[in-house]
Image: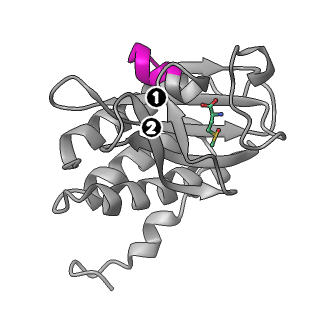
Amino acid sequence: MGQDGVHHAEFSEFASGDREAALQQLVDSYVALASDQDNWVCNLANAASLLWHAYRSLPLDVNWAGFYVADGKNANTLILGPFQGKVACQIIKYGHGVCGTAASLQETQLVPDVNAFPGHIACDGETKSEIVIPIIGKNKKVVGVIDIDCLTYDGFSGVDVKYLEQLASKIAETCEFP
Ligand code: SME
């Protein structure tokens, strides 16, 4: 049990089934968990869990949710971060795939059909749609991306963009990245 008398696992309970409510709860839960914690591994690990449980509470077949982060050893390179789902590719160069495109353009990529996205990197051939949100650090450089994959086409919309961009900016505010 946490210091405040709350079991941390209770943050994993998303009851509503309503997307806006679940995503608002996701952002609020992240802010609460990160309020006295700035370690990026710790915060992104719990954020990956929140993403997973929030999306799995909806009538949507999300199969991967997590993070790629800027690789401190190699410029313009993302490396796999905390996630939930199947084993994924480890390195993505800026400008490659959906994640690398979001990182190089510093713009959210909403992809209704991954097969129509030039250079999409298929970690899991079953994935049909994807959303990637860049996390822009205090120095205006990309510190990482949020990546969520779905087994159906058109899995994501402007509602997801709105709340996931809020989450990205909360992560940038709360985490110390190396
Ligand atoms: N599809 C991504 C690669 C990462 S996996 O989805 C986990 C891309 O094209 O960048």
Give the residues in magenta.
101-108
Provide the major secondary structure of the magenta segment: helix
Q: Mark 1 or mark 2: which comes first in sequence?
A: 2
Mark 2: amino acid: Leu
Q: Which mark is residue 133?
A: 1
Percent x, y for residue 67? 47, 45
For disc 1, the neighbor class at 10 Å (few under 14, some 14 to 19, many from 20) is many
- Nearer the observer, 87 or 51: 87
User: Where, quadrant-wise, is the N terminus in this rendering?
Assistant: bottom left
Mark 1: amino acid: Ile
Q: Estimate the spatial distance between the alpha carbons at disc 1 and disc 2, rounded to whole Å.
A: 13 Å
1 up-or-down from 72: above or below: below
Residue 2 position by quadrant = bottom left
Q: Is residue 106 magenta?
A: yes
- Give the labeled residue for mark 2: 78
- Nearer the observer, 106 or 7: 106
**The residue at label 1 has a CB less than 8 Å from ligand 1:** no
Percent x, y for residue 76? 38, 28
Name the residue at 53% across, 29% down. Answer: 99
71 up-or-down from 32: above or below: above
Name the residue at 40% across, 28% down. Answer: 134
